[in-house]
Image (cartoon, grey):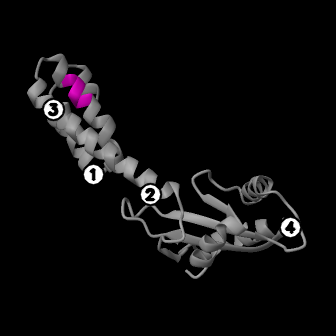
Amino acid sequence: QILLHQGDESGIAMIDTVMQQDPNAIKPGAVLIHEFLMERGRAAEAQPWIDAWRARDDLERRAAAERAEFRPKDEYLGHGVDDAQLARLREGCASLPWLGKVWLVRKKVEVFPEQPAYLLLAKPRWYKRIKAAKAETELRQALDLADTLTVAIYSSDLKALFKRATKA
C-alpha cells in the first residue's frame, strides 16, 4: 500500500500475493490496485481487480444469506466445540433458572465451510414463563455470546426446527 501511494508499481505484486494468501484481503487489495491503475488511466488493467472484488463480495453475500436462516430442512452436524468451551456454556446455563435444555449444533454450510455457523437452541422449563426476546437476551448475557451466533428459543412455531436440529 505504501509503495502504491509512492507511485511504485511493485506494490501491486505484493498486494496480489497477500490477496492469494488471505481471502479477507481480496476486497481491500483489489480496491487499492484498482484505484492505482485508474489514476494512471489504465482502465483495462484495472478491470480484473474490480472483477475480483465483485467475486469475493458475491461469495460473502452468499455466505451471509446461508447463515441468516436456520430451517428444518437444513443439515445439522455435531457442534465440534472443545470441552473447555462447553464447560463455560454449561456454567453460564446453570445461572438461568428458567432454562430447561440447551443444544448447540452446527449448520452444514457450502460457502466458507471453515467458518462454522452455530445455532444454540434453548427450551425453557415447562413451568417457567419467559418471553422469547427476554430469554435470548438473558442467554446471550449469561453465556457472553457473540452476535454472530444464532439463538432460537423454543416455541410451537419452531417445533420442526428443534426436532431436526436436536438430532445432530
Q: Identify the element where label 1 is drawn.
A: helix
Tag 2 near tag 4, CB within 8 Å: no
Tag 3 near tag 2, CB within 8 Å: no
Of mark 2 and mark 4, the one earlier in the sequence is: 2
Q: For marks 3 and 2, give the CA distance.
A: 29 Å
Q: For marks 2 and 4, give the CA distance.
A: 31 Å
Q: Position of residue 104 (x, y in %)?
A: 62, 71
Front position among marks 3 and 2: 2
Tag 3 residue: 47
Front position among marks 1 and 4: 4
Dominant SS type (magenta): helix
Tag 4 residue: 98
Residue 49: image quadrant is top left
Tag 1 residue: 21
Task: State which region is magenta.
Answer: 32-36
Residue type at mark 3 is Gln
Q: For marks 1 and 3, give the CA distance.
A: 21 Å
Tag 2 residue: 66
Front position among marks 2 and 1: 2
Of mark 4 and mark 3, the one earlier in the sequence is: 3
Q: Is residue 106 visible from the viewing direction of this image? A: yes
Which residue occupies the foreground of this view, 2 or 131?
131
Residue type at mark 4 is Trp
Of mark 3 and mark 2, the one earlier in the sequence is: 3
Tag 1 near tag 3, CB within 8 Å: no
Side of 101 where 32 appears, left or right? left
Q: Is residue 154 above or below residue 168?
A: above
What's the residue at 60%, 71% (across, down)?
161
Residue type at mark 2 is Glu
Tag 1 near tag 4, CB within 8 Å: no
Side of 122 where 10 appears, left or right? left
